[in-house]
Image (spheres, rainbow, N blue to C red):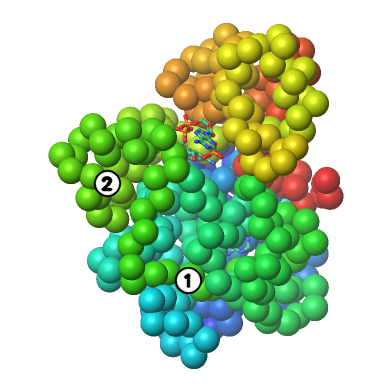
Amino acid sequence: MNELYYEHYNLSDHHTFQLSSRCRYFYPADHESHIPTIFNFALKKNKPVIPIGTGSNIIFREYLDAVIMPLRMKNIAIISNANIDKTQALLKISAGYSWHQIVQWSLQNNLYGLENLSLIPGTAGAAPIQNIGAYGVELSDILHEVIGYQPSKKIWRTLSNQDCQFKYRDSIFKHALRHDFIITHIILNLTHQFHPNLTYPPLKKYLSHHYENNNWSAQDISHAVCAIRNQKIPNPNKKPNAGSFFKNPIVNQKTVLQLKKKSPQMPIYKVKANVFKLSAGWFIEQCGLKGYQKNNIAVHTDHALILIQTGSANGTELLDFSSWVVDQVYLKFNILLTLEPTIYPDAIYNQA
Ligand code: FAD
Ligand code: NAP
């Protein structure tokens, strides 16, 4: 058993925004069997446990009076299942495995379905939390099951795709199982036959422009996604950030019609009947905030949805800045943007 934990530990290297932050205890889980032990430790110390991957969707405030538990298990294997037909394969991956390495592993093994999700930072274990998605594909399209530990009941559970209640950047892990499920493995359902998903116009445009014929392979799609992302999305190692800072608002038709009257050029994406997705980045841009900087935080010059750290900031400074951005959008459009990353320790105490 791993007995190793650290006290008053510096967290700035454990989240991609790299804010100045410390925690009371830092206790890594290198095997799933360590998890109940770490919860018992936290119970004795009367502290909450916060599981983390690479911290690419987390904002840490200055001090966390908690046990931070990075999940570090890294295994990947194809598993057999009598209910799966021969065109498919189930891949079992432990929580600490890097997401982009999973995509690469699948392509090297001629398994398809993940190519559009290339280069998303983070780990397997965090992917179901917000149902990661990009370029027209979401984790829920290929996730078979999630395995994990429920600390309140001290039990190990397997959840089906349906049990996870996936929605746009949302899942049961943000609601009924909020702070009460540690994901130790995910099982993905991939295919041996490649079916390209080119529903996202910028992706198709890039491929048409850079490749001579239309016979694109999964590797071509993965390379194209990486190239587009590298052009637009700042590398957190160079410009600390947490990806999209705000969620795209999901609204009904009445709201769309009201906004459209004032802003006919506003981008609108229909999700289903009477459900529409708007572009949070577009709202911020329309407020004239692209590239705007206050002290050590800025709206990125190439991407209005991404906030970056430009100097040495802490969580309070970042969250004051983001609240100010939310206010500007609300005053101009009457649209309330919500934050995508999880704020700790706030999230432990707020149930909303
Ligand atoms: P963390 O940030 O460490 O954790 C995220 C949340 O999950 C936290 O609440 C944490 O407590 C919880 N958690 C972590 N591991 C576990 C576990 N094993 N069990 C239970 N809870 C856990 N997201 C997208 O959807 N699409 C994108 O295209 C995308 N692009 C990004 C680009 C950049 C540059 C950055 C910085 C982020 C981007 N993101 C994107 C957000 C982020 O990559 C994903 O949300 C990712 O899944 C987070 O993984 P992580 O390991 O870093 O999780
Ligand atoms: P983009 O292509 O500039 O598009 C801006 C927004 O419009 C995106 O958020 C996207 O929503 C939406 N959109 C564009 N075309 C769409 C279509 N045909 N159908 C439905 N929605 C459409 O986006 P980007 O910022 O460069 O990001 C590219 C992809 O990577 C997106 O899928 C985005 O979600 C993902 N990404 C996510 C993060 C994160 O931290 N969550 C960070 C970087 C990139 P969707 O977001 O729903 O796709």
Horizontal and vertical percent for residue 223?
A: 27, 46
Q: Quadrant of residue 107?
A: bottom left
The quadrant the N terminus occupies is: bottom right
Residue drawn at (55%, 28%), measured in percent from left and top?
A: 305
Crowding at dot 2, Cα within 10 Å, few <14 / some 14-19 / many 20+, comes out as some
Horizontal and vertical percent for residue 164?
A: 68, 65
Q: Quadrant of residue 255?
A: top right
Which residue corresponds to mark 1?
A: 189
- In this view, 284 is above or below 276: above
Left or right placement of residue 148 versus residue 226 in this view: right
Horizontal and vertical percent for residue 187?
A: 51, 73
Q: Amino acid at mark 1?
A: Asn
Disc 1, ligand 1: is the CB inside 8 Å?
A: no
Which labelled disc corresponds to residue 345?
Answer: none
> Which structural element holds mark 1?
strand
Left or right placement of residue 67 versus residue 189 in this view: right
Residue drawn at (63%, 47%), measured in percent from left and top?
A: 169
Horizontal and vertical percent for residue 94?
A: 48, 72
> Which structural element holds mark 2?
helix
Which labelled disc corresponds to residue 223?
Answer: 2
Q: CA distance from mark 2 to mark 1?
A: 22 Å
Residue drawn at (62%, 57%), measured in percent from left and top?
A: 129
Residue drawn at (75%, 37%), measured in percent from left and top?
A: 274
Crowding at dot 1, Cα within 10 Å, few <14 / some 14-19 / many 20+, comes out as some
- In this view, 250 is above or below 141: above
Q: Amino acid at mark 2?
A: His
